[in-house]
Image: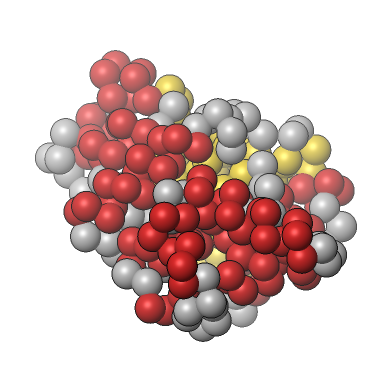
Amino acid sequence: MIAAHNLFISYRGRNILRNASLEAKPGQVLALVGPSGCGKSSLLAALNRMTDLIPGATVSGQITFGGAPINSVFATRAELCRHVGMIFQKPNPFAMSIRRNIELGLREHGERSRAKLKQITEHVLRDVGLWDEVQHRLDHSALELSGGQQQRLCIARAIALKPQVLLMDEPCSALDPIAAERVEQLIQSMRGQYTIVIVTHNLAQARRLADSIAVFWTREGIGEIVEHGPTETIFETSSSEIVNSYLSGRRG
Ligand SMILES: Nc1ncnc2c1ncn2[C@@H]1O[C@H](COP(=O)(O)OP(=O)(O)OP(=O)(O)O)[C@@H](O)[C@H]1O
Ligand SMILES: [Mg+2]
């Protein structure tokens, strides 16, 4: 569905990721794991060209969507972001009402029908398990919600645009354990419907959620993908000493 081929990323001329290739299959969950600073967030950002917005960032290599170069599939970044949504570590709802958070992107993409906006809003809030909690206060500020509720709202906002791919950068790590578990269950329930690429430092979570894993590592100061494949294979039969010691908590 979405793939990186021989990707190199640098910031102001300093290489931070070299020759990284990976792919997320349709409807599957791909987890990116590895120690801090090895380029996981940077690669994730490159997948929907968020790196275009970072001063000094240079990306070479290719990103493909459904097998075709991403720039040939989507004419603009806005189009790309509609199909390849992003969820950040820190929930980032807009400082406006819960309702407006969902409607804004839809309106920007041309949805004008009030009935349709209402219907989609209810639908996506139900999908993320928020409807019962917020249906009586849709016009209150989204900032009144708890962190976990805000994160589920951000996921609702993203899926309202019907993306095929969702990129998630440590979506549970700023949440308390109960809220984190709810978000993890939500991701679990989205399997099959969306292609998900998730960065996580929680290896148990990666094992529970992911169909496949890419293990990142830093060598000579530059990030690389040292192994990429099905979760089972990576956790149980990897022949890489680095991978085995990292996954067993002995390194990293
Ligand atoms: N905007 C930026 N400008 C300059 N250097 C950056 C920028 N963003 C990231 N880097 C550098 O790129 C390298 C990789 O960073 P990145 O955030 O991709 O790592 P990561 O694997 O996501 O780490 P973590 O697990 O801590 O989130 C680091 O050395 C970081 O300092
Ligand atoms: Mg990161």
Near-viewer residue (96 or 168): 96
Residue pictured at 28% horizontal, 52% vertical: 180
Q: Which of the 4 quarters of the picture holds residue 250? A: top left
Q: Which of the 4 quarters of the picture holds residue 150? A: bottom left
Residue pictured at 59% horizontal, 38% vertical: 194
Examine the rendered structure and indicate whether residue 150 appears above or below residue 65: below
Please identify the quadrant where the N terminus is shown: top right
Q: Residue furthest front?
A: 136
| Figure label count | 0
Q: Is residue 144 left or right of residue 115?
A: left
Residue pictured at 68% horizontal, 48% vertical: 162
Q: Is residue 178 left or right of residue 54?
A: left
Q: Position of residue 11 (x, y in %)?
A: 54, 71
Q: Position of residue 83 (x, y in %)?
A: 71, 50
| Residue 221 shows in this picture | no
Q: Is residue 223 left or right of residue 157?
A: left
Q: Position of residue 75 (x, y in %)?
A: 87, 57
Near-viewer residue (142 or 191): 142
| Residue 139 shows in this picture | yes
Q: Position of residue 231 (x, y in %)?
A: 37, 25
Near-viewer residue (39 or 65): 65
The image's colouring method is: secondary structure
Q: Residue furthest left?
A: 250
Near-viewer residue (2 or 240): 2
Residue pictured at 71% horizontal, 61% vertical: 117
